[in-house]
């Protein structure tokens, strides 16, 4: 909830009780009114542990935030992995055009403690085009998996279900409107952010996806 109005974004579990999303997703949020929902754990109140800054702020901080929830023990989460150029990647997102058409989700925004029912993410399977360092000093990923408003903070995963990046708001990150490239903050930057705030280590899987 932000200034009395509700808004939403995406995120990913990177530990049993640790969620990563974008800083701009929770920017100006009322701290005791941050909730997460997924089909596995239901509705949980989230605690903000660490906050970077939106890319537009030029603050020298990554557009990342870390949330803690009282999730059930033994819950599933995504290990980190380093995506490679040409690799297949999957964006799992909850764009506003999708969630706004779901009656249960709209009700949840009005009453965040009520469960909206099953809302599977939209999945887009595409290609990781490049890894690169931007002028802000953080590593990013170019990819062609479509993301839109509401997709901010959602995972970019490999075919083995590991987090290779965190998607950032599409409206500010289309490189060229004639070329459908989108960007994600890389696993490397995510891990650095977690460790910087004393919340690591987090699980990293260095195996080659698909290797026997």
Image: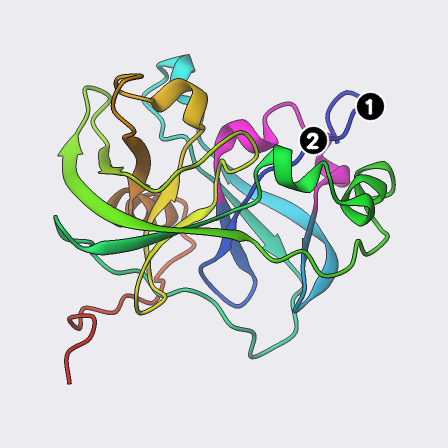
Residues packed near mark 1 inside 10 Å, few (<14), some (14 to 19) or many (20 plus): few
**Where residue 158 appears, x then y in whole percent?**
29, 60
Residue in the image at 57% along x and 38% along y: 95
SS assignment at label 1: loop
Q: Is residue 133 above or below residue 119?
A: above
Residue 191 visible in the shown view: no
Q: Residue at x 41, y 14 (%)?
A: 56
Q: Which residues are magenta?
A: 21-35
Taking the image as shown, residue 78 lies to the left or right of residue 81, namely right
Assess whether residue 31 is covered by the magenta stretch: yes
Compare residues 203 and 166 and report the one nearer the observer: 166
Residue 48: name its quadrant. Answer: top right
Give me the residue at 23% from left, 32% from top: 138
Residue found at the far front of this picture: 178
Question: Is residue 105 something one can see in this rendering?
Answer: yes
Horizontal side of 209 relative to 173 (left or right) equals left
Residue carrying label 1: 4
Q: Position of residue 80 (x, y in %)?
A: 31, 60
The label shown at residue 7 is: 2
> Could you classify mark 2 by the number of other residues whose Cα lies within 10 Å: few (under 14), some (14-19), or many (20 or more)?
some
């Amino acid at each position: 909830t932000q200034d009395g109005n509700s808004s939403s974004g995406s995120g990913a579990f990177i530990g049993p009780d640790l969620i990563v999303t974008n800083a701009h997703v929770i920017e100006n949020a009322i701290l005791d009114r941050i909730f997460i929902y997924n089909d596995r754990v239901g509705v949980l109140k989230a605690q903000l542990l660490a906050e970077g800054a939106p890319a537009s702020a030029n603050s020298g901080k990554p557009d990342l935030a870390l949330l803690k929830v009282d999730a059930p023990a033994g819950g599933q989460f995504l290990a980190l992995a380093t995506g490679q150029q040409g690799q297949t990647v999957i964006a799992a997102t909850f764009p506003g055009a999708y969630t706004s058409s779901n009656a249960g989700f709209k009700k949840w925004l009005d009453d965040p403690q009520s469960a909206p029912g099953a809302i599977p993410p939209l999945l887009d399977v595409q290609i990781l085009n490049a890894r690169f360092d931007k002028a802000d000093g953080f590593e990013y990923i170019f990819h062609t998996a479509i993301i839109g408003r509401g997709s901010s903070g959602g995972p970019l995963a490999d075919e083995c279900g590991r987090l290779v990046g965190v998607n950032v708001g599409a409206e500010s990150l289309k490189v060229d409107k004639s070329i459908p490239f989108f960007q994600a903050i890389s696993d490397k930057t995510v891990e650095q952010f977690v460790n910087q705030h004393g919340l690591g280590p987090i699980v990293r899987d260095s195996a080659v996806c698909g290797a026997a």
